[in-house]
Structures are given as C-alpha cells and as structure tokens.
Image: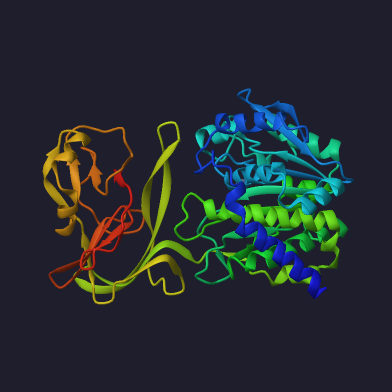
Amino acid sequence: MTTAYSQDLAFSRDLFDTYDTYRETALTHRRFKQTDILPLIDKLKTDGRFEVTKVGESVEKRPVQLIKVGNGPRKVLLWSQMHGDEPSATMAIFDIFNLLRADGSFDDFKKQLLAETTLYFVPMLNPDGAERYQRRNALDIDLNRDAQRLQSPESVILKGLQQSLKPLVGFNLHDQNTRYSAGPTPKQATISFLATAFDQARSINSVRERSMQLIVGMNRVLQQFIPGGVGRFSDEFEPRAFGDNIQKWGTTLVLIESGGYPNDPEKQFIRKLNYVAILSSLKAIATDSYQAESRSEYNTIPENERYLFDVLVRNAQMMRGGKPVTVDIGINRYEVNVGNAATFGYRSTIEDFGDLSTFFGIEEVDATGLTVSPGLIHADTLRSLADLTKYRLDSLLQQGVTTFRLAAPSRATTHAAPVHLLQPTTSAVRPVQTGRIPTFLLRRGNQLRYVFINGFWLDVSSGSNKLGTGVVE
Ligand SMILES: [Zn+2]
C-alpha cells in the first residue's frame, strides 16, 4: 500500500511540475465570461476524441454544453460554476482538456483513463451568473437550493444529466469564502472538500463512503503543496442542494471548494491545485485504487472554521469617552464589480472590534503602543474624480491625508487610486467603529506610523505597504 501511495504522490508531483505546459493561456483571471470559453470548446469539436453536445440553455438562452471524452465503464460527471462567481475549477477544466489533447505526455495515464472511464464535463453551468460575476442565475435563484423545486433551466439540465447518465462519481466544483481557515488556525483553507450527506442522520453508505475515500486520496496529494491548507466543509444535510440530492440519487458526490491562498487574488495557484487534485482523483477512479483508502481518515481533515480576517490590527489604543482603551480591529475587504463585472474594486469594512485575540489576520499589523485616529480630510473639495490627478497622492499619504470631499455626486463606488472619497451628502465625521470603512491612522505620539485607506495600508516608516483600491462613500 505504501508503494501505491508513493506512486500516486509522484504522479501528482509530476502533474504539478509540468502544469505550465498545459495551462490554458486564454484564461488568466476569474472574471471571464462564456464568450471567453466558447472558442475553447469549439476547438475541442475539431478533436475526434471529444464529443460536444448542447444539453440546454440558460435563462438568457446561453448554451450549456456537455463535453464527453473517453469510452470506459466508469462514468464521471464534472460540473463547475453553478455559482457564477466561482470560476476557479472552470479554468482547471480547460487545463485538463489541454493535457488530454497533448500527445506524447502522460500517455500511459491518459490511455488508461480514457479506457476505464468516460468523462462528462459541464464547464460553467451558470453562464448568466458568470456574465454578471454573481452567485445566482438570471432568475436570482441560487441553483444549489433548486435541486428539488427545479425552477431554473440550469437545474433541470444538471438533474437530467445525473438521471440519464447515472454516473458513478460526480464532481461538484465551487469556490468558497477566502476567509475560511483549516481548523482553528491562521492557515487559509485553500481547498476544502465535502462528502455530502444524503440524509439528516448523515449516514454513510457505499455511495458516500466512496466520496470519503476519494477525498482522503486528494487530501494526501494536496498536503504536499499546501501543508495544513486543506479543510473539510460541514456535512450538515441541506435538502435543497444538488450535492446532497445527487448523493441520495446514487452518484458518489465529491464537493471541491476553492478557497483562498496568500497573494493569489485571481486564484491561479488554486486553479493549479484543482487540476492536480481532480486528475489524481480521476486516476484513482480509473484504477479503483481509492478502494484501499480508509474512510476514517476523512474525519482527520480539519473542519472549515471562521477564524480569519483579511487584516487584523492588534493591540491598538483608542480614546473612548475620554479614556484610552485597547482594541483589535478586524477588517474584511469585499470585492465590488465594476462596469460589466469584467473588473472590480474593493469596499472594506470594520467587521469586528474589541478583543479579537482568538482570531487571526491573513495580514496582521502589530499596533502595540500606537493610537488610532481618523484619516485627515484634504481642505480642497474636488469638482470631479478627474481632479485627483492634480495631487501627489503618495506624498499626501505620508502626511496622513486619506480623504477628499466631492462637490458633485459620483456614480463610482470604488476608485483605482488609494484614496477615500466622500459624496457631497456623506458626513465628514469619520468614526472608527464596526460597520465603517477602515480609513484611519496609527500614530506613536505625534509620529505617523500607519495609514489605512479602505482596509489597505501603508507603513509610513518603512514604506512597505499593501495598498489597494480606493472607495467612494
Ligand atoms: Zn458555490
């Protein structure tokens, strides 16, 4: 058994090391749309090994396509982006197609895979949601709460595929909140798994046991690349979700959730991990090697926990009612779609405040001995955002000037430069408290140490920074 494991690990390292050769270079960030992947699917039509079938349409009449490859007895159905703003695995699926198409590499593996399995892929099940970079479809329905009521055409398609193909295994591919940690630790859960429950009692039958075994194998593979960075999602039964129902309908359901990884906002490293994990698992299915896995190991994977803020400022001093108090400040940065959702900015918030000593920050700032005060508002009122180009923002930041007032309302909600802009109707009083945008200063005595703007920061003394987009409030 040790030998089989070490062979699997060597295979996955090989996939990892050669990944760049197969990465689909047309996809480079998360906010691609269906028009970006249709040409990639068209290319597959010219390859005799692939069969592309339109299996239906979204609410807004975008085609939903099924891509079939292989001729083996073990059927596997993989679908991604049921939630339109969860695209990591969609990118990985196109990387997998490139590997399958490349002759002269991994040939033994591919020969065996395509002889022992038939793979059915639905990349981007929710193209209307992807168009808006939103979770829900064009009916404002969450497809993953529509497995019973089936009010959305996309839900009907997915259930229809499961019922007609009756696959042995289904891969339900999602993204999760980047602030989940793997257990009560500072480690982000970069990938999380779930062997979905099929009843309230969370029973384990052979269908569900197989998903636990496949996950145990993928966890072992991923620990090589993200030690301590794999989590396990809660298996509370959700009667409306597809994963739970598909497991109930007799297809082994593997849920893979792409979380966060430091300095990987576009999730390109996480995409690579999806590629490695999915291909490793497909190999285990083709060879039945997963049957040697112990399902009890599944429970050793730490559960997803909520112990992370994007930024945690520790031990700051603040004046409250004339008295100094010690506080930690927990800051989260939320993405805001801009324009047609092809780009985005951030609007950050002070999520929590007080004693946060049991939590962690993906970024942490030690504010021991430093005092919080609001950012300074520039004396000039801007006639428009374009006026900003007249100012040297970097030197204003060094002085603690974070904010400008606008003379006329702006429709923008974020701004590319690190500056906090106030609409004419927004109060110029900027208290630092929960629910507010984290724009403030940290000083030691009279000396300015840190400038925070919209949850991003500059260390004035060292120049090191994590500056991001500004905000219009
Ligand atoms: Zn999801």
The image position of residue 102, as x and y in percent, is: 69, 44
Left or right of 58 on screen, residue 298: right
Find the residue positioned furthest to the front: 104
Q: Is residue 350 above or below residue 345?
A: below
Q: Quadrant of the C terminus?
A: top left
Q: Please indicate, yes or no, whether residue 250 appears anywhere in the rendered image.
A: no
Residue at image coords 28%, 76%: 368
Quadrant including the N terminus:
bottom right
Above or below: residue 84 compared with residue 433? above
Horizontal and vertical percent position of residue 79: 70, 42
In the displayed structure, 152 sits above or below 31; it is above
287, above or below 316, in the image: above
Residue 240: x and y in percent read 71, 44
Q: Nearer the viewer, residue 114 or 147?
A: 114
Q: Is 100 placed left or right of 19 in the picture? A: right
The image's colour scheme reads rainbow
Q: Position of residue 410 (x, y in %)?
A: 26, 33
Q: Looking at this rendering, what residue extends furthest in the left direction?
A: 379
Q: Residue at x 21, y 63 (%)?
A: 373
Residue 448 placement: quadrant: bottom left
Give the residue drawn at x 60%, y 41%: 83
State the image quarter where residue 47 is shown.
top right
Q: Nearer the viewer, residue 460 or 273?
A: 273
Q: Residue furthest bottom?
A: 369
Report the residue that reaches farthest toward the top: 61
Residue 348 is left or right of residue 386, and the answer is right
Is residue 73 visible to us here? Answer: yes
| Total numbered circles | 0
